[in-house]
Image (spheres, rainbow, N blue to C red):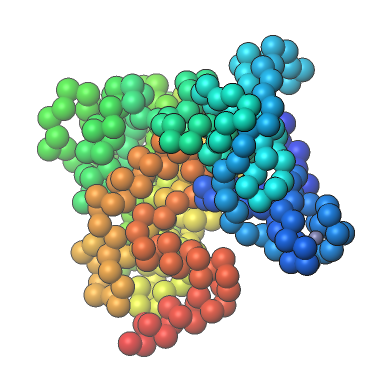
Amino acid sequence: MAERIDLPPAARGVPGLRFSAGAARGVFELPVCEDCGAQQYPPRERCVRCLSERLVWREVAAAGELLALTKLHHSNERFFASRLPRRVGLVRLEGGAVAVVHVAGDVAPGERVALTARLDRAGEGVIVAQLQGAGHLDEGLMDEFTYPLQGRRVAIAGPVSAYREAILKQVLAAGAAEVVLIAGDDSATEDPRLRVVSASARGGQRRLAQSVGPVERLIHAPSFAEPAEVGSLAQAVARAVDEPLALIQALRPSLVEHGGAVVQVLSIFGRCYFPALGAQCVPAAAAVSATQGLRASLQPEGVRVLTVFCGPAVGGPALPLPAAAPQRVAQAVVRALDEGREESYADPVAQDVAEQLREDPELAARNLAAMSRG
Ligand SMILES: [Zn+2]
């Protein structure tokens, strides 16, 4: 039987899950009472001050004053027991609520702190406080909340494209110790840290895993293949789903062993059909769904799945929206890992469509349809 992976406690009520959904996008949101203005922490369904049910989730000022600080030397949770001592504090938010937080760096009670909503190893939202203006989290917390590339073994997969090339360059620039490019071609980059594993050498999962070696980060460059180019819609769907899943399956033991992360770069039009783009949206939607399934199956094993959404691809059909620049997409991939952000948007189009989908999915679809008519 597989050894149980230690993860932080993940039980949350519905309001807690809503906080996690904001944290997944790196947004600090709390319910705010429409009647008396009170911010609610912990998130709840009725106002703590006036019992009103009229609570609205809003992004709130992510700053406050550290009221109290304690250093834990014992925990009954196995996950925390192996990460002691650790500091936990109480912060009074600018909006008045008092929250329990993880504390990073040297902070004393009375000092002002900046707060971030982050997903922990169990994929649930927690609050981390650090001195305003402080840079990276300290090492222990970085290991819990982020997936930096510095000194790590990274695999990059996906079809040959300007995106894959840009991602490769950014990953090397971010200080990866070793990069394995799972490719069907020779890469032009002559970096001693780069190793190219031929995609055609895929003689079963075990052999592929052996040729790739230990992996801590796996990045899938986007696949924007036109169904017509691939052969058929069914083949395009298969390529968008089967190949990435088979690869992740092969590298799964290594990713689990290292508490690693997978980055899937996906088209935002996999979440909402864009008539101007046509059948390309279908494999994109399949890839989005497969990624959600992947996240659900890898989360209990301590492997995080991060998605970076982007708008139209460069070199694709003429569209009424600007294409996502490859360098921008590559930077978004590195940032997602650096910040441990589960969902991010590489370009303004992806950001805009995602916002519309959150507000009104029906309207978002109509907007894209109207734009397609020109
Ligand atoms: Zn109230």
Asked whether residue 235 appears in the rendered view, the answer is no
Quadrant containing ligand 1 reads bottom right
> In the depicted view, which residue is nearer to us: 12 or 253?
12
* Residue 335 shown left or right of residue 193 in the figure: right
User: Residue drawn at (45%, 68%), measured in percent from left and top?
Assistant: 353
Q: Residue at x 75, y 45 (%)?
A: 42
Residue appearing at x 50%, y 66% in the figure: 355
- On screen, 99 above or below 43? above
Residue ranking furthest to the front: 110
Q: Position of residue 146 (x, y in %)?
A: 48, 32
User: Is 182 situated left or right of 64 in this image?
Assistant: left
Q: Is residue 41 above or below residue 209?
A: below
Residue 66: in sight, yes or no? Answer: yes
Of residues 123 and 218, the one drawn nearer to the viewer in this rendering: 123
Image position of 249 (left or right of 159): right
Q: Is residue 271 left or right of residue 221?
A: right
